[in-house]
Amino acid sequence: VVSTTVDAEGEGSAAATPSSAPTSTTTPPTYTMDFVKAQCTILVGMHSDEATEPIVDFALKYKRPFAVVPCCVFPKDNPHRRHPTTGGKVESYQDFVAYLKAKPSLCGSPIIEQILPFEGRNTVLYYIPNSSVNGMDNKAVDGVVTTECSADDTSSVPPPTDAI
């Protein structure tokens, strides 16, 4: 199991704990963000609260597929967020979904919205770089989806949300 903490700039830390790890005072190894960037093949956030936007930003910046089920909006903590259509503050759940969905991607693939078959916050937003959704085909190597855009090319990445 790998647990990560990532800020909007894609920086943070990761810790791995084997599922059969003893519950004594064993300290799990700590990995660098370079390791996470190299090894991470998909990001998933289920009701990930304040981590939802950093998950989306990290995935878009490093061209990784993601799926998030947004829940809490935290409008007072995020006054920088603006609705993509109205320009108003992002204050409701629907505003937050629209805001996340409008984030630009380097590979041109859209962020897709689907409704999951359960009660409550059930909107999933997902992104697959160079997905066939926009007419391009994914390539898979050893079960990992690859993209045609360079993972090192971040020249057109939008600034982190906390810098806006």
Image: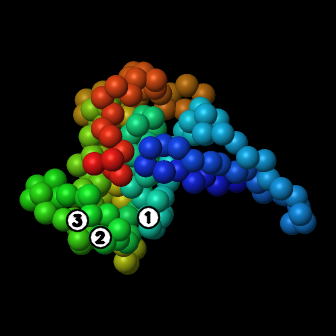
| Secondary structure at numbered mark 2 | loop
The reply to whether dot 3 and dot 2 touch (C-beta < 8 Å) is: yes
Of pointers 3 and 1, the one earlier in the residue sequence? 1
Q: Position of residue 147 (x, y in %)?
A: 42, 26
Could you give the CA–CA distance between mark 3 and mark 2, rounded to whole angstroms?
6 Å
**Viewer-proximal residue, 76 or 105?**
76
Q: Position of residue 158 (x, y in %)?
A: 30, 38
| In the rendered image, the vertical position of residue 36 relative to residue 23, given as above or below | above
* Residue at numbered disc 3: 90
> Is residue 84 rendered to the left or right of residue 3?
left
**Viewer-proximal residue, 12 or 114?**
12
Residue at left 45%, top 35%? 62
> Is residue 45 rendered to the left or right of residue 97?
right
Residue 53 can be seen, yes or no: yes
- How many neighbours does mark 3 have within 10 angstroms: few (below 14), some (14-19), or many (20 or more)? many
Q: Position of residue 66 (x, y in %)?
A: 44, 47
Could you give the CA–CA distance between mark 2 and mark 1, rounded to whole angstroms?
11 Å
| In the rendered image, the vertical position of residue 86 relative to residue 153, given as above or below | below
> Is residue 46 rendered to the left or right of residue 148?
right
| Secondary structure at numbered mark 3 | loop
Query: Disc number at residue 122?
Result: none
Residue at left 62%, top 48%? 13
* Residue at numbered disc 1: 50
Residue 123 can be seen, yes or no: no
- How many neighbours does mark 1 have within 10 angstroms: few (below 14), some (14-19), or many (20 or more)? some
Tell me where residue 20 sits by quadrant: bottom right
Could you give the CA–CA distance between mark 3 and mark 1, rounded to whole angstroms?
14 Å
* Residue at numbered disc 2: 75
The reply to whether dot 2 and dot 1 touch (C-beta < 8 Å) is: no
**Viewer-proximal residue, 5 or 110?**
5
Residue at left 46%, top 59%? 51
